Image: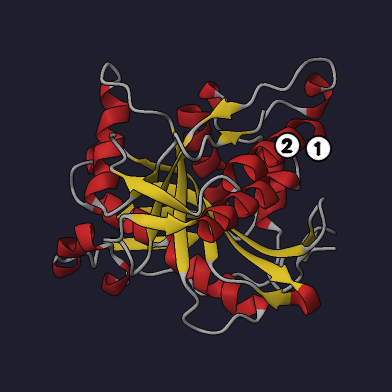
């Protein structure tokens, strides 16, 4: 049983902080400015006062579009302990660390985000590289958009990756991949294109969807899925290969690690009927390509 599942709460981590060296090459200029009025709080459990505020704001933005899990799922994810790996449906184990962050600037709510760091484990619970961080949702309050705060929102998950890796027994310095599931470019959708351009400026690249036709599982409740056919959501994988942002291709082994890690996160709560067909599809397209092209997110 993961710590916290019986109603107790494992000790909260040291609060994340702003680390200029973690900024992507495209965001590095933000590290020279004064951000001393920004605080970051990692919500440890659903009893924390910031939990309801963060969840409700993220749900308002993403839940209405079917892009966010239920409150119950998020509450359970907060109890995941990377020191107690979970067993995966298709064998093997993974250390999972979910984090929900609240950022304030000058005492006012400025942004929030959530993400899950994943360390896959091989025989003997041996940590496998790379560490993958699934970037779930990020929201910057309108008053703080265009200020550069988003650069920190995108870099903070690196600290979750390191914590998860350390507690899973991985060696320091394990390679890290940050990955977001994004909707395809649509020139008529102005906000979407702005998000994609922002990721591009921050040194994120898109795995060519012609080679990697990835899909997100149907998030509807199991009781609803039981009475209907699962509807997968085709999405593009946008990735930052930390320290290797300028490379134009990535090996199939890293793409496979991304897919395995995201599906490990979803597999804890998603019925096999909705996820197994996507795993099978991914196995087929992963076997077709040795190295995957990396494109601008807007391509």
Residue 97 found in image quarter: bottom right
Count of number-bearing discs: 2
Asked whether disc 1 touches disc 2, contact meaning CB atoms under 8 Å apart, the reply is yes
Q: Nearer the viewer, residue 105 or 200?
A: 200
- Residue at 26% x, 61% y: name it: 246
Residue shown at 26% from the left, 20% from the top: 187
Image coords of residue 55 (percent x, y): 55, 40
Residue on which the image places disc 1? 272
Residue found at x 74% / y 31%? 274
Relative height, residue 213 to residue 26 (above, below): above
- Colour scheme: secondary structure
Image quarter in which the N terminus is found: bottom right
Query: Which residue bears the numbered disc 2?
Result: 275
Residue 27 appears left or right of 69: left
Q: Is residue 279 above or below residue 59?
A: below
Q: Considering depth in this image, is 218 or 277 the residue closer to the camera? A: 277
The 10 Å Cα crowd at callout 1, few under 14, some 14 to 19, many 20 or more, is some
């Amino acid at each position: 049983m993961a710590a916290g599942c019986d109603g107790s709460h494992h000790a909260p981590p040291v609060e994340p902080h702003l680390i200029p060296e973690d900024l992507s090459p495209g965001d590095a200029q933000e590290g020279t400015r004064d951000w001393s009025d920004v605080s970051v709080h990692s919500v440890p459990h659903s009893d924390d006062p910031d939990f309801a505020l963060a969840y409700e704001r993220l749900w308002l933005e993403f839940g209405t579009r079917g892009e966010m899990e239920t409150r119950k799922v998020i509450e359970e994810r907060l109890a995941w302990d990377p020191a107690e790996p979970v067993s995966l449906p298709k064998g093997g184990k993974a250390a999972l660390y979910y984090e929900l962050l609240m950022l304030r600037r000058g005492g006012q709510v400025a942004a929030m985000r959530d993400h899950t760091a994943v360390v896959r484990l091989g025989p003997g619970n041996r940590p496998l590289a790379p560490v993958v961080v699934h970037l779930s949702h990020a929201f910057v309050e309108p008053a703080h958009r265009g200020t550069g705060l988003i650069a920190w929102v995108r870099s903070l998950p690196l600290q979750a990756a390191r914590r998860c890796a350390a507690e899973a027994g991985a060696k320091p310095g394990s390679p890290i991949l940050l990955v977001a599931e994004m909707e395809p470019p649509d020139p008529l959708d102005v906000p979407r294109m702005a998000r994609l351009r922002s990721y591009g400026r921050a040194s994120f690249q898109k795995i060519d969807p012609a080679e990697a036709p990835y899909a997100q599982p149907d998030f509807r409740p199991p009781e609803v899925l039981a009475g209907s056919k699962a509807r997968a959501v085709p999405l593009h994988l946008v990735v930052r290969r930390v320290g290797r942002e300028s490379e134009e291709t990535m090996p199939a082994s890293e793409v496979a690690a991304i897919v395995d890690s995201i599906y490990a996160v979803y597999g804890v709560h998603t019925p096999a009927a909705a996820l197994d067909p996507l795993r099978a599809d991914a196995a087929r397209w992963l076997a077709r390509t040795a190295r995957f092209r990396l494109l601008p997110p807007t391509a």
